[in-house]
Amino acid sequence: MGNGEWGMVNREWRLGSGELPGYLCAMNIGFDAKRAFHNGTGLGHYSRTLIRSLAEYFPENAYYLFNPKTSNSFDLSGPRLHEVQPSGFFQKLFTSAWRSSWVKQDLKRLKIDLYHGLSHEIPVGIQDTGIKSVVTIHDLIHERHPEQYNAIDVKIYNKKFRYACAHADQVIAISEQTKRDIMAFYGTPEEKISVCYQSCNPAFGQTISEQEKERVKKQYGLPAQYFLYVGSLIERKNLLNICKALFLLRSELDIPLVVIGDGGQYKQQVKDFVNQNGLEKKVIFLSEQEVARSSAEFRSAAIFPAIYQSAIAMIYPSFFEGFGIPVLEALWSRLPVITSNVSCLPEAGGPGAHYVNPANADEIAAGMMKIINDAAYADELRTKGWGHAQEFTQQKCAAAVIDVYNKT
């Protein structure tokens, strides 16, 4: 039993609103839930999936979600989930300061036993409060490839990440690759770091009906057959080399690539290549189309399982990842995956992926043709991929995190 005595308050409760109904709980666990409520990409998916999994499989605890401001993007309601927002005038005005430091007062008020920074940071000075802390480090790409970031951002990330690794009681790395990087760049002792793989939305593992898949194809103008890329359109994700592979196959293959994701300068570089090489009909930037931008089910990723399960293969030849969640989503969807033989991607894909050198467009092209022309090989990838995905169930991933909490 932790020092917390209260739990099971409803989601609408806010600090200062009155008495809490009593309910004994094993532990009061707090989360930095900013990205859980506001982020639609990898960090948000990780946060939401973990929080929901913990609440489902370890209901003896009470889970407090510290959210700097109201969000209508994602719902995290449930009998064990308690959203907490800043209550005072200055806390509401300076939400970044509340999240990064002032929140400690609210952690103490709610008798939080353990605080989990879900994305690289913990409140400054939490180590002086008597409240245990855990931080998840997803990747140290800003250390490995600082040229891909604004110089000021690199300094900010370095300070926050380094502080969190030094002062948290335990550090969670989401892959062995990330664990090695934390030790190498920050000198964090190995015994302080636990590798806890992440899971994904269980909807990807549910078989989508043909009727629903056809509805989604028709509504979003998807072709009968297509390859799929999902991820931010940034340099290390390597969409350009996928497009170069399509160009190499221009006379052999008439199957387009559907791209889900957005970006800035690098996206324009990719689009310039597409336009200069006559690939406009072979690369569909779905996220920028009005039907997708105006769709709540697209923005929340609710229809992604249908899009995945209608594709021929996921192509994800990233140069470097913390984990590579689209690979896992594809494995759960029984979708063959072409991904990189570097970084942590062999951890994510296991025996269920076709591996390529991400710098070699010819290898990417060969992988695409192999999956198209060899049905038995594609089926083998689906079977092995599904088997490997069972190592990343929500229950297993949540249990690994609970183990970290229990030894903190």
Image (spheres, rainbow, N blue to C red):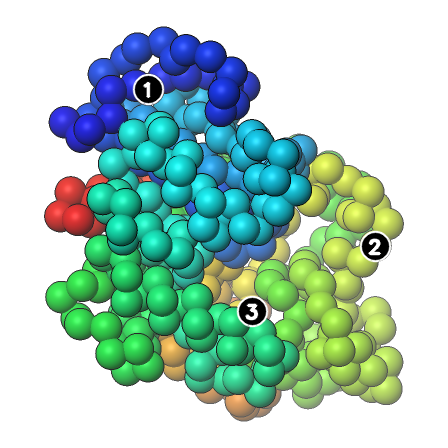
Q: For the residues carrying marks 3 and 2, which lies nearer the camera in this image?
A: 2
User: Which amino acid type is marked by label 1?
Assistant: Gly
Coordinates of residue 101 in the picture (x, y in percent) = 45, 50
Tell me the CA gap for discs 1 and 3: 44 Å
Disc 1 secondary structure class: loop
Give the mark, 1 or 2, whose residue is nearer the N terminus: 1
User: CB of mark 3 within 8 Å of CB of mark 2?
Assistant: no
Looking at marks 1 and 3 on the same chain, the residue that comes earlier in the sequence is marked by 1
Q: Dot 3: what SS?
A: strand
The x, y position of residue 396, in whole percent, is 25, 44
Residue annotated with mark 2? 289
At 53% from the left and 89% from the top, the residue drawn is 359
Whether residues under marks 1 and 2 lie with C-beta atoms below 8 angstroms apart, the answer is no
From the viewer's perspective, is residue 344 above or below residue 395?
A: below
User: Dividing the image into 4 quarters, which one contains the N terminus?
Assistant: top left
Q: Amino acid at mark 2?
A: Gln
User: What residue is rendered at 18% in x and 63% in y?
Assistant: 192
Q: Nearer the viewer, residue 143 or 391?
A: 143
What residue sits right under mark 1 in the picture? 7
What residue would you read off at disc 3?
315
**Could one spot residue 241 in this view of the protein?**
yes
Q: Nearer the viewer, residue 366 or 76?
A: 76
Image position of 264 with respect to 314: above or below: below
Residue 141 % position (x, y): 47, 76
Q: Nearer the viewer, mark 1 or mark 3?
A: 1
Task: Decide if residue 274 is in sight here.
Answer: no
Q: Amino acid at mark 3?
A: Ile
